Image (cartoon, coloured by chain):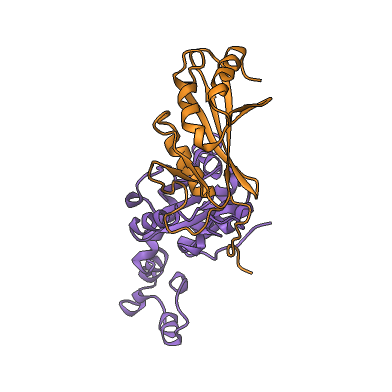
Chain colours: A purple, B orange
């Protein structure tokens, strides 16, 4: 039964679920029970909200370097067109967006502003670290003024490797994030 | 070599400024005479270097060299002026009063090399105010960054 999806390891709760669909406690009419089982799923409302969230991220572009071209401009154009996945409205305000795409090198002077903008985003919010620089400092990791990875500042949900990654790679990252948000089994990487 | 007209004017100027030396690709001058030379280069109608395209500095480990790249929109010629300053006393007068555009470039040179421009406020422009040291100096050593 779908109710089990995402449930905790609490044994008592599991056994209660195994007792059957809630409709069975109300009637024994087989037709009603079968129809109710087919149509009515009991799950947290959050699951439905997550379904909507996963299909309509509003990205907050944090373009800091060349990754911004591949990650923020590329996917918008008709060739890659991330609006077909529902990720169309690029927001330039953190208050209107779900997922921050950090595309580029984070310098120490930029770091406080990145954290402030992240904190201004409303919950729930996610972060995609795009490109070598945002993941771990990239070729500039030994520089005196580069933050070695944006995960030193804010929690990162998806890492998209590349220097820079192609727009397809970012789309793949967005789809991984969708899977994560909708509670399916997340895949770390594909071959 | 500087433009012929400019070279002639520089020869006149060098008579009064002993430290001025006209080289193959640049003019060198002591920092004590810098302001007088720069003002002449801008205000003399034959030179008329009305635009400072670039102001940089180099660390040669025993001294700094501050380099000024000048362009004349009136005559279309250019000139490079170099000024050596000792490493233990890295001070040089500001040219902001002559070319206002020197502001940010002098701040950058101060920020990255620690050259102090006298006659103006020196503040960092690229790095944050709490940063220790001047990273483009050859003896700048920095520990940190990636996790070991």
Residue B103, image x and y in percent? 42, 37
Q: Residue at x 38, y 45 (%)?
A: B121
Residue B97, visible in the rendered structure: yes
The answer to whether A141 appears left or right of B98 in the picture is right
Q: Which quarter of the figure has residue B3?
A: top right
User: Which residue is situated farthest in the left direction here?
Assistant: A26
Residue B73, image x and y in percent? 49, 16
Residue A104, visible in the rendered structure: no
Q: Is residue B15 above or below residue A161?
A: above
Image quadrant holding the N terminus of chain B, namely top right
Q: Is residue B1 above or below residue A50?
A: above
Residue A122, image x and y in percent? 33, 58
Q: Is residue B1 above or below residue A99?
A: above
Q: Is B9 or B76 nearer to us in this picture?
A: B9
Residue A13, image x and y in percent? 41, 83
The answer to whether A136 appears left or right of A51 in the picture is right
The answer to whether A171 appears left or right of A40 in the picture is right
Q: Which quarter of the figure has residue A17?
A: bottom left
């Amino acid at each position: 039964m779908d109710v089990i999806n995402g449930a905790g390891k609490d044994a008592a709760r599991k056994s209660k679920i195994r007792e059957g669909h809630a409709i069975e406690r109300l009637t024994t009419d087989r037709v009603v029970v079968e129809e109710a089982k087919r149509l009515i799923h009991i799950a947290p409302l959050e699951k439905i909200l997550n379904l909507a969230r996963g299909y309509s991220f509003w990205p907050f572009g944090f373009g800091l370097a060349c990754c911004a071209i591949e990650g923020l401009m590329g996917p918008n154009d008709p060739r890659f067109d991330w609006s077909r996945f529902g990720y169309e409205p690029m927001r330039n305000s953190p208050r209107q967006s779900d997922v921050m795409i950090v595309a580029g090198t984070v310098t120490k002077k930029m770091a406080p502003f990145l954290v402030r903008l992240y904190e201004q985003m409303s919950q729930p919010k996610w972060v995609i670290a795009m490109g070598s620089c945002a993941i771990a400092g990239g070729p500039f990791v030994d520089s005196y003024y580069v933050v070695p990875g944006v995960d030193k500042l804010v929690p990162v949900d998806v890492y998209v490797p590349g220097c820079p990654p192609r727009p397809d790679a970012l789309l793949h990252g967005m789809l991984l994030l969708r899977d994560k948000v909708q509670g399916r089994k997340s895949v770390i990487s594909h071959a | 070599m500087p433009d012929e007209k400019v070279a002639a004017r520089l020869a006149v100027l060098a008579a009064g400024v002993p430290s001025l030396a006209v080289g193959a690709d640049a003019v060198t001058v002591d920092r004590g005479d810098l302001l007088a030379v720069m003002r002449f280069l801008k205000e003399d109608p034959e030179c008329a270097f009305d635009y400072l395209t670039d102001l940089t500095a180099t660390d040669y480990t025993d001294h700094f060299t501050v380099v000024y790249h000048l362009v004349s929109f009136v005559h279309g010629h250019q000139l490079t002026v170099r000024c050596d300053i000792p490493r233990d006393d890295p001070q040089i007068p500001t040219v902001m009063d002559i070319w206002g555009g020197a502001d940010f470039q002098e701040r950058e040179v101060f920020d990255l090399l620690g050259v102090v421009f006298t006659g103006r406020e020196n503040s960092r422009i690229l790095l944050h105010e709490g940063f220790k040291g001047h990273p483009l100096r050859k003896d700048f050593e920095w520990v940190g960054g990636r996790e070991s």
